[in-house]
Image: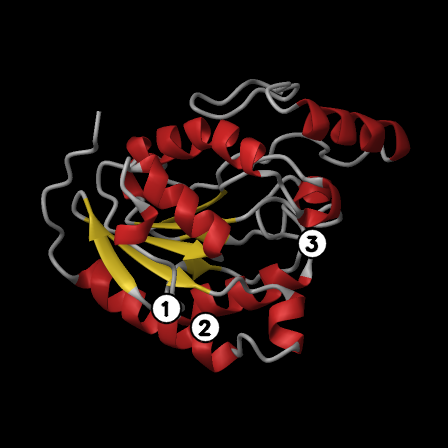
Amino acid sequence: MPEIPGEPPRDCALCPRLHDFISGWRAREPRWHNAPVPTWLPPGGAGEVELLIAGLAPGLRGANRTGRPFTGDFAGDLLYATLGKFGFTRGAFQSWPDDGLELSGAAITNAVRCVPPGNKPTAAEVNTCRTFLKSTIDRFDNLRVIVTLGKIAHDSTVRAFQERVAAHPFKHGAATQIAGVHIVSSYHCSRYNTNTGVLTPEMFEDVFRNVRKLVRARPPCRPFPS
């Protein structure tokens, strides 16, 4: 598989714990993706992206298995249903990467590109992988909005802009602005959050209803910090 500019290589070893964890799963499940999961783009590429969704990390039997963000686990069911409702996808989501679903004006990535044991990356792993998050953000000249799913993804996104988290705290449904980009935070669309009532489909839709308005608004000039 050819390397994608700005994305970690298939055998990225910057985080030894994650590299070893994936290596073990390659031996157990050789047909799985079992590698860093690249950012998913719309058909027209980076120039079409006005909305970026940043999750935490691939799920073991989700994106780590399928190779496409939020594909193969419950979180994707809610995310893609909501994106479709607000016009950010085309086609039907069927939980496998060749289902024909396409993004429309949006891209999807993760703060940490490799699956972590127990779905819990360490702070050092989040910090290490931020170089790829920053390079991803920097690819999108027409970016207007970033939706951060969960506090870890939110804080890493803020730090990718070289801003202080204290000045842009995580709060579900809140919006802030950095370098001309609206940062909208949401609870993660995980099964745990929805089963416990932390996040309901209605709450998630409210977030993207606001996002839809922000994307349609005229974007300010966006100088990215050097």
Q: Position of residue 122 (x, y in %)?
A: 61, 38
Residue 95 shown left or right of residue 49 in the figure: right
Residue at left offset 56%, top offset 51%: 100
Q: Name the residue under label 1.
A: 208
Quarter location, residue 2: top right
Q: What element carries label 2?
A: helix
Inspect the image, locate mark 2, and give the three-letter code of the amino acid beneath it: Phe
Residue under label 2: 204
Q: In which quarter of the image is the N terminus?
A: top right
The answer for how far apart the CA atoms under marks 3 and 2 are is 20 Å
Q: Residue drawn 56% across and 68% down?
A: 78
Quadrant position of residue 47: top left
Front residue of this view, candidates 106 and 75: 75
Above or below residue 159? Residue 151 is below
Circles 1 and 3, Cβ within 8 Å, touching? The answer is no
Q: Can you say whether 138 is above or below 170 in the image?
A: above
Q: Which mark is residue 226?
A: none
Residue 123 place in picture, x, y as percent: 55, 38
Looking at the image, do the residues carrying marks 1 and 2 touch, with CB atoms under 8 Å apart?
yes
Which residue is rendered at x = 36% and y = 68% of the image? 208
